[in-house]
């Protein structure tokens, strides 16, 4: 019954014309897009407690997942997960455009933690969750430098949820994007929520220069005035996937 109602909703609401913002579950979409292609490596930037890492491994069970998470509170959890599932490789590092160290802004809600300070708008939208409770210096690497030290494994899928740090991470992954990546699933901000954090237009341009195209957007969020603030998006290397 649920499938019938869902089909009716899509046909009624969109009249088979499709829409830029998809109501589809993005995991089956990614599985379909990469059907027939070998997925050896998944890079999960902003892995937190590993829940999303696990979901990606259900979609691509033969892959190895590199779970990047600089937040100290998740170290024990990710370590335990890796002991239970050898496909998970925790990387207690932040990702950026160059190697070094940066100050992590640890907020009351772990989901708002970022290398960038929450903007005034972010703090007004989420006064409790976005409040910075402490900071910590964390090691930062580029994806290309990290990958070279690992022996250049194939990274066919990248996922980013790093609160405005996506552009810097992508700029540090030019070789990886050029050599092996087929799909990028990332959070995108349409309006500033972090001081100096990347916006959608910048991420889109960076990925297009690397041969990627926007496939669709998922789960858009607005503020109390209805202004579009952020969403998730799938970008694909259309040539590699034959799209």
Image (tube, rainbow, N blue to C red):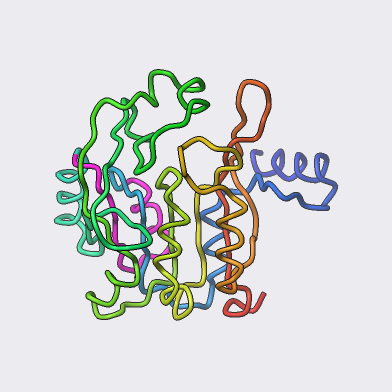
Quadrant in which the N terminus is drawn: top right
Q: Is residue 178 left or right of residue 53?
A: right
In the figure, residue 145 lies in which quadrant? Answer: bottom left
- Residue at the image point whose x is 20% and y is 39% from the top: 136
Between 36 and 170, which is closer to the camera in this rendering?
170
- Residue at the image point whose x is 48% and y is 78% from the top: 178
Quadrant in which the C terminus is drawn: bottom right
Q: Is residue 3 left or right of residue 140?
A: right
- The total of numbered circles placed on residues is 0
Please provide the residue range marked out in magenta: 51-72
Q: Is residue 65 magenta?
A: yes
Q: Is residue 14 above or below residue 130?
A: below
Q: Position of residue 70 (x, y in %)?
A: 25, 48
Q: Is residue 241 above or below residue 205?
A: below
In the figure, residue 45 lies in which quadrant? Answer: bottom left
Q: Is residue 127 above or below residue 50?
A: above
In the figure, residue 170 lies in which quadrant? Answer: bottom left
Q: Position of residue 56 (x, y in %)?
A: 40, 57
Q: Position of residue 176 (x, y in %)?
A: 41, 74
- Residue at the image point whose x is 26% and y is 43% from the top: 103
Between 172 and 14, which is closer to the camera in this rendering?
172
Q: Is residue 54 magenta?
A: yes
């Amino acid at each position: 019954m649920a499938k019938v109602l869902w089909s009716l909703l899509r046909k009624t609401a969109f009249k088979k014309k499709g829409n830029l913002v998809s109501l589809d579950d993005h995991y089956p979409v990614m599985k379909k897009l990469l059907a027939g292609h070998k997925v050896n490596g998944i890079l999960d930037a902003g892995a937190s407690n590993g829940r999303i890492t696990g979901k990606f491994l259900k979609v691509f069970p033969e892959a190895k997942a590199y779970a990047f998470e600089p937040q100290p509170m998740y170290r024990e959890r990710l370590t335990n997960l890796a002991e239970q599932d050898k496909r998970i490789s925790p990387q207690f590092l932040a990702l950026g455009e160059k190697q070094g160290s940066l100050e992590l802004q640890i907020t009351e809600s772990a989901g708002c933690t970022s290398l960038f300070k929450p903007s005034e708008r972010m703090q007004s939208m989420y006064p409790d969750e976005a409040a910075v409770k402490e900071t910590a210096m964390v090691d930062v690497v580029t994806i290309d430098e990290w990958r070279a030290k690992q022996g250049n494994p194939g990274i066919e899928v990248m996922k980013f949820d790093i609160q405005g740090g996506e552009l810097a991470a992508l700029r540090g992954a030019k070789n990886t994007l050029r050599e092996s990546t087929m799909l990028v699933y990332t959070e995108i901000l349409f309006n500033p929520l972090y001081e100096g954090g990347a916006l959608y237009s910048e991420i889109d341009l960076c990925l297009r220069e690397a041969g990627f195209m926007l496939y669709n957007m998922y789960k858009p969020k607005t503020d109390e005035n209805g202004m579009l603030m952020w969403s998730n998006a799938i970008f694909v290397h259309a040539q590699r996937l034959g799209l």
